[in-house]
Amino acid sequence: METVDVHELALLRGARHDLEWFGAHYQNLLKAHNNEFVAIKNSKIIAANPKLEELLAKIEKLGYNPIETLIKYVTNAYSVLY
């Protein structure tokens, strides 16, 4: 049986917490960041941009690892799939 690294466990817990924060604050995020990607770390928006490539560059410039950062797209648009 494989053991989970302490760092990996902390990342998973942080990601879950940030995802819960994202859901709880979605309506406010719609007002400020509709049709944008947002990067969330420790329950804070660290960057936002409508272009994913530019968001990733900003995250790295700020010293964060994009792989360890929650990135979500905020929109009030929806589509129906048939």
Image (tube, helix red, strand yellow):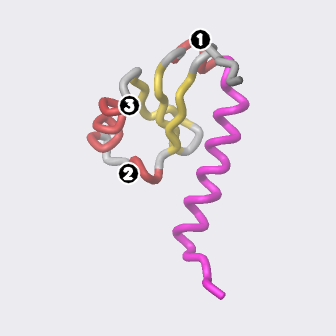
Region of the chain picked out in magenta, as a range: 1-27
Q: Is residue 56 left or right of residue 70?
A: left
Amino acid at pointer 3: Leu
Amino acid at pointer 1: Lys
Query: Which of pointers 1 and 3 indicates the residue nearer the eye?
Result: 3
- What element does badge 2 sit on? loop
Label 1 vs 3, first from the N-terminus: 1
Query: Where, by quadrant of the figure, is residue 52 drawn?
Result: top left
Query: In the figure, 9 relative to 25: above or below?
Result: below
Give the image location of residue 28, x and y in percent. 64, 18
Query: In the figure, 32 relative to 55: above or below?
Result: above
**Structural distance between the alpha carbons of marks 3 and 2:** 14 Å
Query: Who's the residue at 50% across and 38% down the image?
Result: 71
* Residue matched to label 3: 52
Which residue ends up furthest to the bottom in the rendered image?
Answer: 1
8 is within the stretch colored magenta: yes
* Residue matched to label 1: 31
Query: In the figure, 57 relative to 12: above or below?
Result: above
Amino acid at pointer 2: Asn
* Residue matched to label 2: 65
Label 3 vs 2, first from the N-terminus: 3
Judging depth in this view, the residue of 16 and 62 nearest the camera is: 16
Q: How many marks?
A: 3
Give the image location of residue 38, x and y in percent. 48, 30
**Structural distance between the alpha carbons of marks 1 and 3:** 19 Å
Which residue ends up furthest to the front in the rendered image?
Answer: 82
